Amino acid sequence: MNIKFAEEKIFKVIMICSSVLILGVLLYILGTIFHKGLPALTLDMITKLPGGGFYLGKEGGVLNAIVGSFYIIGGAVIISLLISVPLVMFINYYLPAKSVFSAIVRFSLDILFGIPSIVYGAFGFALMVYLGIKASLLGGILAVAMLIMPIMMRSLDEVAKLLSRDLPDALLSLGSTKYEMAKVILKQLMPGLITAVLLAVGRGIGDAATVLFTAGFTDNIPVSLGQPAASLPLSIFFQLGSPVEEVQNRAYASAILLTVIILILSFSSRFFSSKFSKHKI
Amino acid sequence: MNITAERIKVQTGDHLLVEEKATPELKVIPDLAIRTEDLNVYIENQHILQDINLTIPEKSITCIIGPSGCGKTTFLKSLNRMHDETPEVKTEGKIFVDGINIFDPGINVIDIRKKMGLLAQRPCPLPMSIFENVAYGPRIHGIKRRKTINQRVIQYLQYVGLWDEVRGRVRSSASKLSIGQQQRLCLARGLAIEPEYILGDEATSALDPLSTKIIEELFIKLKEKYTVILVTHTLRQARRIADYIVFMYLGKVIESGPTAEFFNNPKKQLTREYLSGAFS
Amino acid sequence: MQRIRFAKDKTARYFMLGVAVFIILFLLIIGFSLFFKALPIMREKNLWNLLTSSEWKPFKGEFGFSSFIISTVYVSLIAIIIALPLSILTSIYLNSYASKSIRRFFEPVVDLLSGIPPVIYGVWGTLTIVPIVSRRIAPLFVEYSTGYTVLAGGIVLAVMIIPLMISIMVEIFRSIPRDITDASLSLGATRWQTVKKVILRRSFSGIIAAMVLALSRAFGETMAVLMVCGNIPLIPHSFFDACYPLPALIANNYGEMLSMPSYESALMLAAFLLFIIVILFNGASRLVLNQIEKRYHFT
């Protein structure tokens, strides 16, 4: 009799320890990054380009990587939206609810979702060679777009699935074409779309393996699609590889920048998705 | 030439005619706005509507009553071909609206839907302002001029009695209205496309009694210009506002006729049982 | 006017259909491209040889993948061994024991952990895990270790896959109908007994599926592991040896790729192998998870 209660008590303690451990690891990670990086985080880091010898300790900042990352992710989001939005509208509102075709599409999405970023990077590289594109902003945009598309699609699909059928029915009863109906529904899904974009950006901006082969790296800010682009994850990685301690510290500072961006994105997407669920009731 | 003023005959397929009170001389048969011919609807192989042969007279209110699951909503949705959107539904037979079979291959479903204004059970305002909600229909059907749009919006908001309540805030979101107001807005929206028929699918069941009363009065007003077909699950509502009743049970039309006759002198045993509350 | 309307509608429909078909084909396109690029080296050498030899001397034309494959497997195994119990325990706690506020508090925690970019995990790993392995754990077992080891890779990877497993498991546990758990509790079972006999038993296939999914994620993780694993192309003999998983191989050597066509082909083969493994694992576990969702889906 007592055994079953004792067992429960023991496991309860173990479970709580496990949960606390996980929470602790998160705090540990954030703490380490901020602790190491804060001293080296100067205004210069955010506003200047790396000077010559930056990686050996000379002056400069990581503006090239900040801007480069934003350019890359910006382009990737645009391409991804152009494909994700029509796809999700199609499988949710054009195809019948239980169609085999939509099941196949969703399954393909699930698999694409799980492909590691290095494979997208390698494929992106092969694609670029085939098309004759060198390592550049364009290459980075294409590779990151491939990575974030399934993420955006799945997130948007989850939201679209929840939408009640009342709205499409009402629109069609008024004599709308499916396209007109889709435009209005998209309006209703807007918070969900924003969440999907934020989620995708969060994943795409921090990923190194996609841009490694495809975007190249540079100390400058690209002014055209054909020029190579720096990115934060790669910048962090390269700075870390320097023998000079000061540069390594700057790597931690850059890591803070990236982490802060991610934190902002994460909280914004929570904010938007809660806003959406308020509507749904 | 005696015709009792309010008694007009309604013919239904295989059922007997409602008897006339006055001398059987001139029988005035009104314009049959909608006529169904051997309508059968199957949903995933279940025979939901069986051999529906029905006529619905114009410019009047016809209420379709019956226990839940008897096929009322399925019938209503057949009228504006909403079943086109669900491939699990198979339809056989014909529905003649103004003399034309709506299932004819040459017919564009959008034209059919433009003729039918559907008011659903739960009000569903579009995610836009009050103004845009009403303007939506006219806009997609080709009306561009701002003046015409404005006129229509005001006209129909007035018609449903919303104009005075919302005139100061037509640009604000429609979701801020009360549920009764939202339903009236949906009605205005449906009217704005200038249909010929108004279909209501238990349109007041989600509303409070006061809003229900307002909507019912609107239906009565509507029948002057439109043919109104309502699915209702409360007998009382049917008694209040209907000119004609159609009683359905398990996918078949059991009986139909003018309201007073239907309630006072039901012909079928099943009808009598239903009216007395033996099942619902 | 009406004609334009219908034309727009039709164009939109065709575009959407095209996109849908493209997505289905995309998977095949990626597979074929990688395969095609890997073909040269598969023609040059025997595939079996490539997979089982551990000689990696590209400039001498030796391309043995076995040390990379084994490294990948080792690192992922350690990650799963660490992550699985922790994830299950935490998921059970969150689902059956934790109060609503604790549950709500943990949601962002899990989200944040899954959102942290791999490179940051790599930085953290180099700063904290590698020294811990080198100074505190390794001395208990071996003479010396730099800390850039299989173990370090496994630990970092474990932390990365825990959020994924927790979110899947919590969903699975939540989908078990309340009636069943209530029935067990009203028969006098403790919560823990209910968990053991009812929840875990019913979720077994789901937990396996979550594990397989996490494993496939672990196989493909590049950056974080690369920074802590040592990158030495030898078969690791203990957890305190350095290793060199497949993704790290591809990432580290892309520069060299361009110098020799067979090197490039070898790396593409590595990518293709990864692709196939991940697809198989992903596909299988998704099928299982979809079945579970269908069985218990309520909404």
Image (cartoon, coloured by chain):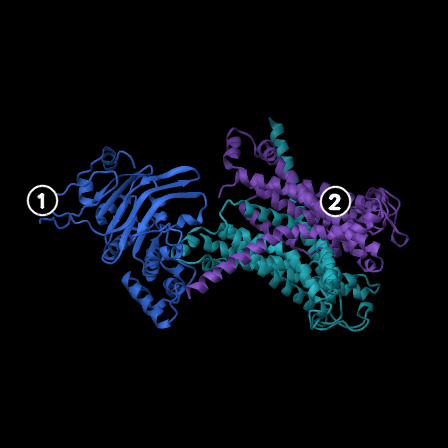
Chain colours: A cyan, B blue, C purple
The three-letter amino acid code for the residue at tag 1 is Thr
Image coords of residue B257 (percent x, y):
21, 43
**Residue type, label 2:** Ser
Left or right, residue B264 beside residue A239: left
Crowd class of label 2 (few under 14; some 14 to 19; many from 20; radius 10 Å): many
Do the dots labelled 2 and 1 sit on one chain? no
Taking the image as shown, residue B226 lies to the left or right of residue B133, namely left
Secondary element at tag 2: helix
Q: From the viewer's perspective, is residue C161 above or below residue A258?
A: above
**Would you name the residue on which mark 1 appears?**
B23
Q: Nearer the viewer, residue A109 or B19?
A: B19
Q: How busy is the neighbourhood of tag 1: few (under 14 within 10 Å), some, or many (20 plus)?
A: few
Question: Which residue position is annotated with label 2?
Answer: C76
Q: How many marks?
A: 2
In the figure, residue C176 lies in which quadrant? top right
* Residue situated furthest right in the rendering: C60
Element on which disc 1 rests: loop
State the residue at coordinates (67%, 65%).
A72
Front residue of B6/A163: it is B6
Mark 2 to mark 1 CA distance (whole Å): 94 Å
Q: Position of residue C63 (x, y in %)?
A: 85, 49
Relative image position of residue C236 (x, y in whole percent): 84, 44
- In which chain is the residue bearing label 2? C
